[in-house]
Image (cartoon, rainbow, N blue to C red):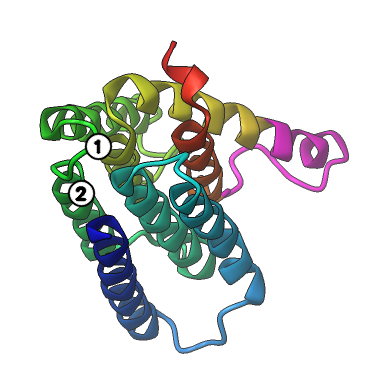
Amino acid sequence: MLGFVLIAAVTVALSAVAASRMSVVTMRHIAPAAYVAGGIPAAVAVTAFVRGHANAAAAIGCIAAALCTVTDVATGLIFDEVAALGVIACWCASALPGVQHVTGAVVGAWSGFALLAAVHFATHRRGLGWGDVKLGAVAGAALGAPLVVHAIGVAFVIGALSVLPGLLRRRRRFGERIAFAPYLAVATVLAAIVPSWAA
């Protein structure tokens, strides 16, 4: 029951912060695709929690990743407040009974952050934006250190597979901006509900 309350409270807080920040950044209409891109991973995460396939920290991390997806698709930004609140909420949820240890969530957050920061700086800040690095911390706090590495790898594969047809048909060009948050959100949800990744 405490997990449900925490998930609901964090979802409301994250949604309010994201909506507030998006209204400051853009006054234009937000495309429905942005809400669909974020809503699907969030719905899957909550369903997995209800059915017992994901713990509260994983569900909160997936919801935070989904909201980061909405803001990334709508504005091109992942807001510091949303990512930080997502990480802190995952750390708090990891202290609940039956969830990973807080140490695992902290190490996971730093692992996800460090791995994507390395890619960010190795590509001279063109391969990934700093928001994606922050989202890596959210995914790591939700999943823990071993799973976040798998999730990030899967996110890159999903992203590459989705972009490849456009490159082959010359509808996309190398160097074109592509939102990475949707791919990382989907991979985070998959890692949260597929326990065999831990093996």
Q: Residue at the far front: name it.
A: 1
Q: Give the residue at x 34% y 73%.
A: 18
Closer-to-camera residue (119/110): 110
- Kindly identify which residue carries mark 1: 99
* CA neighbours of label 2 inside 10 A, class few (<14), some (14 to 19), many (20+): many
In the picture, residue 67 is in which quadrant? bottom left
Above or below, 145 against 69 in this view is above
- Residue 95: x percent and y percent? 13, 42
Task: Answer with left or right where residue 56 lies relative to residue 2.
Answer: right
Where is residue 99 drawn, in percent x and y? 25, 37
Question: Where's residue 138, x and y in %?
Answer: 30, 45
**First reached walking from the N terminus: tag 2 or tag 1:** 2
- Residue at disc 2, secondary structure: helix
Residues in magenta, as a range: 161-178
Asked if labels 1 and 2 touch by Cβ distance under 8 angstroms, the answer is yes
In the rendered image, which residue does mark 2 sit on? 93
The C terminus, quarter of image? top left
| Residue 165 lies in the magenta stretch | yes
Depth order, front residue of 170/188: 188
Q: How many marks?
A: 2
